Image (tube, rainbow, N blue to C red):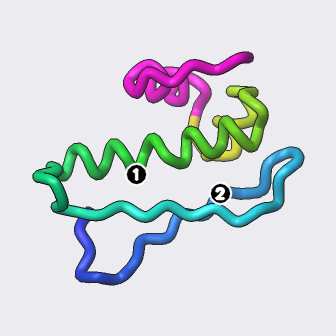
Amino acid sequence: MLSDGHSLSLTLPYGKASSENWSHVSSFPLQERTLYDVTDEVIKSPILEALRRCEGNRRYAARMLGIARDYLYRYMKRFGIMSEN
């Protein structure tokens, strides 16, 4: 994804106990980052936020993100994300 200076907005539905707003800003091409680096960051950030909002519950986090739990597990493994639940 590339931007001409406009922002990319990602919205997560509210978690069990959280109704706070959340946003993520990513810059490109600072520090010789590749498109893959930026897209990985854009994927990882909402996963971490969903897990935080769902207190580590992967089923609820996957539901919040609108993805299957299997995909969440794959992303967690890919990014080295550990969850308590």
Identify the residue under disc 2: 12
The residue under the point 23% across, 68% down is: 2
Q: Magenta: predominant secondary structure element? A: helix
Query: Farthest residue toward the right?
Result: 17
**Quarter occupied by the N terminus:** bottom left
Up-down: is 77 above or below 27?
above
Quadrant housing residue 23: bottom right
Using the numbered discs, state the Cα–Cα distance from disc 2 to disc 1 in whole angstroms. Answer: 13 Å
Identify the residue under disc 1: 42
| Left or right, 32 with reference to 60 | left
The residue under the point 33% across, 42% down is: 40
Q: Are marks 2 and 1 in contact (CB under 8 Å)?
A: no
Which badge, 2 or 1, is on the more N-terminal residue? Answer: 2
Query: Farthest residue toward the left?
Result: 32
Quadrant housing residue 4: bottom left
The type of residue carrying mark 1 is Val
Q: In this picture, which residue range is highlighted in magenta?
A: 68-85
The type of residue carrying mark 2 is Leu
Disc number placed over residue 5 in the picture, else none:
none
